[in-house]
Image: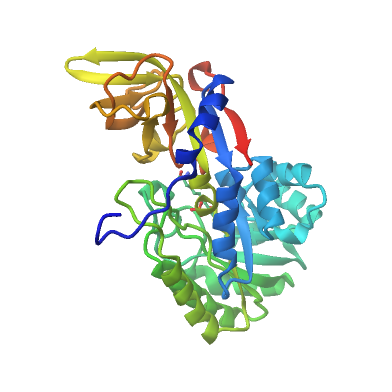
Amino acid sequence: IEHGKPQRRVPWWSAARPALLERACAGTPRYVYDLDTVRDRARALAETAAVDRCFYAIKANPHPAILRTLTIEGFGLECVSLGELEHVFATLPELSPQRVLFTPSFAPRREYEAAFALGVTVTLDNVEALHRWPELFRGRTIWLRLDLGRGDGHHEKVRTGGIAAKFGLPLAKFDEFLDRAHQLDIRISGLHAHLGSGIEDPRHWREVYANLAGLADEAGNVESIDIGGGLPVPYTPDAQDFDLAAWRDGLDEIKAAYPRYALVIEPGRYLVAEAGVLLLSVTQVVEKDGVHRVGCDAGMNALLRPAMYDAWHGIHNLSRWDDSDARAFEVVGPICETGDVLGHSRLLPSATAEDDVMLVADTGAYGMTMANTYNLRALPAEDIIE
Ligand code: LLP
């Protein structure tokens, strides 16, 4: 432990290298998820006294074993498409619809119809839908997603509040929404805001909570306040673990002022990112114009985050763990795009060679679920470690 630096958790996979090398023999690219890590993060959040209900945003990783693990831990599930709803009920046929939220964006009418028929909680985020489809919403109980006028998060592409974002009813239309809902005999039983993903400042949720609670008093009949997900994980070596204690303190404070509302959260990344690794095999090692590149059997097709958000993931050579002689490599995939880079200038064993197994860390969230078949490369396999 370096003095002055807060202690970071040791990743589960550093003790699981032999098991991972064995899994890699079954074929790469391959995602491997550790369910103990998922449970650990779930318990850390569920222990928060102020939080009444937790829903897991399944878009982060809808693997059936992860859905089972989290529902056993008491989590509900948050879905954004009919495909996600169908997946949830196919995986967990016994799951009560009361434990499922439907929070779509610009979904077609038939998806709202299907969600009402399933009996899940539907969140709407615009007033136009009430004007266009009054009979669909008449007499229903729904939640309302608001844009509180600002967004936050690790990259502009994941900020879901403010003028540039397509999500949420702007506050300027709040009264119009309430009037229209009243005309249609709609009960708004929840207010929701999710303003971005990978938000570092623990005070963010406290502010959203206070904002929504103030508005809930105006809306009448509100029972639940959903302050979204967005909790970060430490991807880079110098990043710190999220300050859960500060996060909890902020929520406790607002809860004390507004005890009448049930507090709901819907995290994705925090629960699963650190639980997942992506295993790749080295295909070729090449030097060009003084730049050394390690090529792997998947890149942006298996893990889009570096190409899409310049996201940083730790990359390690599992086959040469104890090699101390290192040099800087570009770690690239096989896709026909210059942007197909998993990591720039990474220190890896100089002897890195064909068939070595590479591990890309913290890829349990938005990894497999954003993988694609570009260049007609196959999707990665997936494995669980219990
Ligand atoms: N609730 C809603 C309505 C959401 O849209 C999201 C994520 C979440 C909850 C969960 O957010 P989380 O706790 O995972 O931050 N692909 C991006 C992240 C996009 C997040 C989309 N919405 C990435 O890889 O960073």
Q: Does 150 sit left or right of 267 as displayed? A: left
Residue at the image position 33 percent from the left and 32 percent from the top: 343
Q: Position of residue 221 (x, y in %)?
A: 68, 79
| Front residue (pair 321, 52) | 321
Quadrant assignment for the N terminus: bottom left
Up-down: is 147 above or below 361? below
- Residue 183 sits in which quadrant? bottom right
- Residue 308 sits in which quadrant? top left
Q: Position of residue 144 (x, y in %)?
A: 60, 66
Residue 380 appears anywhere in the view = no
Quadrant assignment for the C terminus: top right
Residue at the image position 26 percent from the left and 21 percent from the top: 350
| Front residue (pair 173, 301) | 301
Q: How is the image coloured?
A: rainbow
Residue at the image position 82 percent from the left and 51 percent from the top: 94
Q: Position of residue 181 (x, y in %)?
A: 67, 70
Up-down: is 11 above or below 252? above
Q: Position of residue 348 (x, y in %)?
A: 30, 28
Q: How many labels, in total?
A: 0
Up-down: is 273 above or below 371? below
| Front residue (pair 24, 118) | 24
Residue 341 appears anywhere in the view = yes
